Amino acid sequence: MEDKSYAKPHKLLLNNRRTGTISGVIDVISFDISEILLETEQGMLTIKGADLHVNRLTLEKGEVDVEGQIDSLTYSEITDYHKMGASLLGRLFK
């Protein structure tokens, strides 16, 4: 395993599956009422649920507050989404 050095510490605090505070966020890729996709220092974070809202977004500090019915939190590698996005854009503009 390689030891990575991260610019901002990544922390996730979830309260009663209704509200959450996430730090170490690099970018918000997409969000709607059923899914929020965040690029974090530890990889891509997908938050799924119902009636989801981004209440506070401070990218300078790398912090996001979310609210709604949170059903799942899933991490994946960042490179997977960049490849997927490039191929999707490539297909759209052909």
Image (spheres, grey):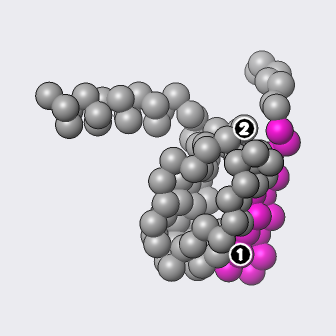
**Left/right of residue 51 with respect to residue 64 in the rendered view:** left
Q: Secondary structure at mark 2?
A: loop
Of residue 29 and residue 43, the one placed in the foreground of this image is 29
Q: Which residues are magenta?
A: 8-22
> Where does residue 26 sit, x and y in percent of width and height?
67, 41
Q: Which mark is residue 19?
A: 1
Q: Residues within 10 Å of mark 1 (few under 14, many from 20)?
A: some
Q: Which residue carries the number 2 mark? A: 41
Q: Which mark is residue 79?
A: none
The residue drawn where x is 76% and y is 45% is 60
Can residue 17 be seen in this snapshot?
Answer: no
> Where does residue 88 sit, x and y in percent of width and height?
29, 36
Amino acid at circle 2 = Glu
Which image quarter holds the N terminus? top right
The reply to whether the magenta stretch includes residue 13 is yes
| Residue 90 higher or lower than 30, as above or below | above
> Where does residue 29 sit, x and y in percent of width and height?
51, 47
